[in-house]
Image: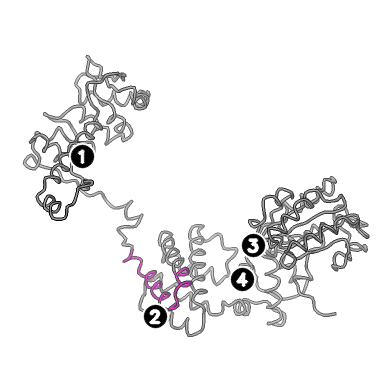
């Protein structure tokens, strides 16, 4: 008998052999045991994780003549015919090559006939998403209400392309990618049963490159066994998977992390000379960046997917890089991979990206890094002298300049001084105070007023913790005051700080527009070109002190 590939030879034959799909297996076994079977099932998930195998096992379980609990016996005539693909009652249809409406019409006619040998006629439609829209529409009624002797099992790797009308008529089961540990355990059992020598590092490479797909891992294992004559080692595995020259990419990564730009041209030139795909090199750099980030963030504990060589590599590199820099490197390499798709001069694009990655300290100066911002001392605030700032403007100071003056002095507006003080200690309360006004002082009580329209600020400031805080600081600016009370006023005679500021801005805008209209150059342009002023926009922010000074001069 000719050799049978491992992916076919080791295909699961009962529910217990299906790897890492516990939810699906448990639900189907319970449905069989409780006799709660429905007419249509939809199996979705990535390639090579057991969708078609599960469908065949389920079909055997429905028709087995001597079931072993909920598992098929795999010995009776029905089981053997289904396994060999010769059963007349379990029909597998390839959705990619039978995707038209005519094939679905034939299926609709065929479902009316009773099964020849089995209890249930089962239709397994693989890659069902390939059916045309008309074919799906033709299948709808049959799929919803088939004869009692028929069951449909639809399988797909692209569930998004299946109409919602089809999905709503099926029980949907999502198959997952097989985790590293489960696949490692399964492949180890395979190699032990086949009595083959293997290295754990080689298995790690196979599993990582199978992307959670059992069929891919078995196919790669078959190829490696054929190449080596029976021994699965890291060197040959790396060669067959295209990783034999990864030392060059590792050298490039080290050069980038050490910011040794002088070595980059020679390494890139060697990568190109050896015929290594630059897209593959970019993808490898991204993978190294990801692995190194996880190695650093977990303290070198999460290394089950790494080979011993990679573990040593990341241990040595972890001292040369920080997590923040790895974030930036990932962005550079990701953009490089995208740029390689659109430019024909790939080597130049790759070289410039490598230079950029190796020059991050100059592209992103240390002073702009998160760590530097959090640790850098605050710049000293320059205090204005009496000559630089006249006394008549001192009481006009806004909360934004509060840090310039710690205590109120003669000539200050006590209310504004109190708001500035609150801005230093409690920004939230200061924001509320800017939208209310000082109603008055009566004995030891400071009254703060607001209107019905701004009742929100009244409620906020009236909270016990805020009133307590205001009562504690009010005495510093209003001598003798020991408590604060909030009041609603329907017709307030005073304006809030925010309203005063807006009025000043409105006045300044009006004054600026008038100056623009009366400008000699503007008038000349209007006369020469017959132009008309449509709109004037004030684009320069003027400090509040200058605005108020101009108002006082006017």
Mark 4 lies on a secondary structure that is helix
Query: Which residue is label 4 attached to?
Result: 205
Query: Which residue is label 2 attached to?
Result: 265
> How much space separates mark 3 and mark 1, taking CA atoms?
59 Å
What residue sits 51% from the left and 57% below the top?
Answer: 298
Query: Which residue is label 1 attached to?
Result: 401
Query: Which residue is label 3 attached to?
Result: 180
For the record, the magenta segment spans: 336-363
For the C terminus, the quadrant is top left
What is the chief secondary structure element of the magenta stretch?
Answer: helix
Q: Nearer the viewer, mark 3 or mark 2?
A: 2
Say whether residue 340 is left or right of residue 123. Answer: left
Q: Is residue 241 magenta?
A: no
> How much space separates mark 4 and mark 3, taking CA atoms?
11 Å
Mark 3 lies on a secondary structure that is helix
> How much space separates mark 3 and mark 2, taking CA atoms?
37 Å
């Amino acid at each position: 008998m000719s050799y049978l590939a491992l992916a076919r030879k080791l295909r699961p034959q009962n529910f217990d052999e299906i790897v890492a799909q516990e939810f699906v297996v448990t639900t189907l076994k319970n449905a069989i045991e409780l006799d709660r079977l429905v007419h249509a099932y939809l199996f979705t998930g990535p390639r090579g994780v057991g969708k078609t195998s599960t469908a065949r096992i389920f079909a055997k379980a429905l028709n087995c003549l001597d079931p072993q609990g909920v598992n098929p016996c795999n010995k009776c005539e029905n089981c053997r015919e289904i396994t060999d693909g010769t059963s007349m009652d379990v029909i597998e249809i390839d959705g990619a090559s039978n995707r038209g409406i005519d094939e679905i019409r034939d299926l609709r006619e065929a479902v009316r006939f009773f099964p020849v040998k089995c209890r249930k006629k089962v239709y397994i439609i693989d890659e069902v998403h390939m059916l045309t829209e008309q074919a799906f529409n033709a299948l709808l009624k049959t799929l919803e209400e088939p004869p009692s002797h028929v069951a449909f099992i639809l399988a797909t790797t692209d569930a998004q392309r299946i109409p919602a009308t089809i999905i709503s008529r099926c029980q949907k089961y999502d198959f997952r990618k097989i985790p590293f540990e489960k696949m490692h355990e399964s492949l180890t059992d395979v190699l032990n049963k086949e009595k083959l020598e293997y290295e754990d590092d080689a298995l790690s490479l196979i599993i990582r490159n199978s992307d959670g797909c059992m069929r891919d891992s078995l196919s790669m294992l078959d190829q490696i066994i054929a190449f080596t004559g029976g021994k699965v080692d890291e060197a040959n595995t790396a060669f067959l998977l295209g990783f034999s020259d990864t030392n060059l990419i590792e050298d490039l990564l080290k050069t980038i992390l050490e910011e040794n730009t002088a070595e980059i041209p020679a390494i890139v030139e060697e990568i190109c000379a050896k015929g290594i795909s630059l897209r593959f090199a970019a993808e490898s750099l991204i993978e190294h960046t990801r692995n190194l980030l996880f190695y650093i963030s977990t303290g070198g504990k999460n290394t089950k997917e790494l080979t011993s060589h990679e573990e040593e590599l990341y241990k040595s590199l972890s001292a040369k890089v920080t997590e923040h820099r790895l974030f930036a490197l990932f962005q550079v390499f990701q953009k490089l991979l995208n740029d390689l798709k659109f430019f024909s001069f790939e080597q130049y694009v790759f070289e410039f990206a490598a230079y950029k990655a190796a020059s991050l300290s100059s592209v992103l100066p240390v002073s702009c890094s998160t760590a530097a911002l959090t640790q850098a001392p605050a710049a000293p605030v320059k205090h204005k002298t009496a000559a630089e700032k006249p006394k008549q403007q001192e009481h006009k100071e806004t909360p934004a300049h509060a840090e310039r003056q710690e205590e109120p002095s003669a000539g200050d507006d006590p209310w504004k001084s109190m708001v500035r003080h609150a801005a230093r200690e409690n920004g939230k309360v200061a924001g509320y105070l800017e939208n209310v006004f000082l109603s008055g002082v009566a004995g030891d009580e400071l009254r703060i007023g607001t209107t019905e329209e701004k009742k929100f600020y009244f409620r906020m400031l009236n909270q016990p913790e805020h009133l307590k805080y205001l009562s504690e600081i009010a005495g510093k600016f209003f001598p003798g005051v020991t408590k604060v009370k909030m009041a609603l006023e329907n017709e307030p005679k005073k304006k809030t700080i925010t309203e005063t500021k807006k009025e000043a801005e409105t006045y300044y805008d009006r004054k600026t527009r008038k100056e623009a209209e009366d400008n000699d150059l503007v008038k000349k342009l209007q006369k020469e070109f017959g132009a008309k002023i449509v709109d004037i926009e004030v684009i320069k922010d003027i400090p509040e002190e200058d605005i108020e000074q101009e108002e006082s001069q006017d």
